Amino acid sequence: MSINRIGTANMYDSTISNLGSRQSSLVELMEKTTAGKRVLRASDDPVAAAQAERARTRITRSENEQRVLGAQRDVIAQGESELGKAHGALQDFRDLLVQAGNGSYDQVARDALVKQMESLRDQILGYANAKDSNGLPIFRGLGSSDTPLQSVPPGAQSSLNPGQNTGSDNGLPISLDGHAAWLNVPTGNGVFEVGSGVSNSGKAWADTGSITDPSKVTGDSYTLVFSKDPASGAVSYVINSSAGTSTPSATYKAGEAITINGQQIVIKGEPANGDSFTMAPSKRTDIFTVLDQAISTVKSGTNGSAALQQGLGRAMSELDSGMNRVQAVRSYAGDQLNRADRLESDMKDQSLTQEGARSRAEDIDMITALSDVETQKVGLQAALQSYAQMQKLSLFNYIS
């Protein structure tokens, strides 16, 4: 049997070391509990610290993307609002055109309508040049000057580049395509446009025309020339094509459709000898040219009801096409706003997922931590009391 001698000093040193270790452990646990984190320093858990740092980086990136998304949404929302106001102004303009066609109106009444139409035209130009909170044109597309549309009647001078930029990887635009909204209006009915001869002296006018068979449309231009028999008063017409062909003379009947190569127009009224009407392929113009031509038509209404009726018919057809373009871009803006809402929801979900990953990596379980703090406090208290009792174990205490 071996006997080991343990000195009192050695016991004191061992106990003090144990007390220090317990106290250090308790302080560290209380520090983590106060911070609410299991990992305060990378040395606590290198793997968890790296996971938490990656999660924080992704959260920061998601927050930046949400800020960018918010700025994009503001621009799109403002653009959608401006397009809505422009569409309303265009509808008011159209209502005035309908009033201008009222046969009971004299030129004084039409001149009053012209003033209102000119005011609406200027309002619409202002909407087209609207700027965002950064002072940049909303409808600048791929780039433009500070004022992309300059009023140069008839029409507007444009510095717009078609298309639109995106602000980040989310694909949302940071501007809207003003070229598509304001500068892409087809003339006439969208396939061909009808015009009257400059020297027409009769009382005939034509509608905007229609398509009866798209497969027969050749893209040629046609001129309908009318002649009137001085003896019988019968009116006939021939159709000359830009391809160099002509149709045989045909008898004119007011209101009867005239069809050639899948294209049809209706002419009403009484044409004079030598009067003519043209059918030419549709071109592209801007909405402001349409408005200016409509205003000019109403201004010159006293030149004859035939010219007024034909001009108003063409103006309303082209105005409807322009309104459709504005509404199409507005619908696109609305779709992008819906897409922004979905992207924001996805970003928030991603941030929540990354926050969960960070929490699992470095946050502490408070219930368990508080329980451990109390346990370690009790252990430290017991160790202190044991040390106090140990100090009394001296032979001199018994001798005295």
Image: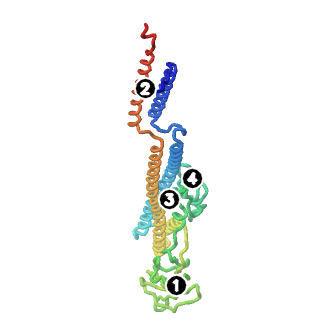
Of the residues under marks 1 and 2, which one precedes in the sequence?
1
- Judge depth for marks 3 and 4 and give the one in front: 4
**Mark 1 to mark 3 CA distance (whole Å):** 37 Å
Label 1 vs label 2, nearer the camera: 2
Asked whether the beta carbons under mark 1 and mark 3 sit within 8 Å of each other, the answer is no
Could you give the CA–CA distance between mark 4 and mark 1, rounded to whole angstroms?
Answer: 49 Å
Of 301 and 225, the residue lying toward us: 225
Please name the amino acid that badge 3 sits on. Ile
Q: Secondary structure at mark 4?
A: loop
Quadrant location, the C terminus: top left
Q: Earlier in the sequence, mark 4 or mark 1?
A: 4
Local secondary structure at mark 1: strand
Please tell me which residue is depicted at 54% across the width and 40% down the height of the picture. Answer: 42
- Helix, strand or loop status at disc 2: helix
Question: Taking 170 as reference, is 250 above or below it?
Answer: below
Q: Which mark is residue 224?
A: 1
Q: Amino acid at mark 2?
A: Leu
Residue 380 - label: 2
Per the model, the C-alpha gap separating discs 3 and 2 is 81 Å
Amino acid type at circle 1 is: Leu
Q: Residue at x 53, y 67 (%)?
A: 184
Q: Which mark is residue 124?
A: 3
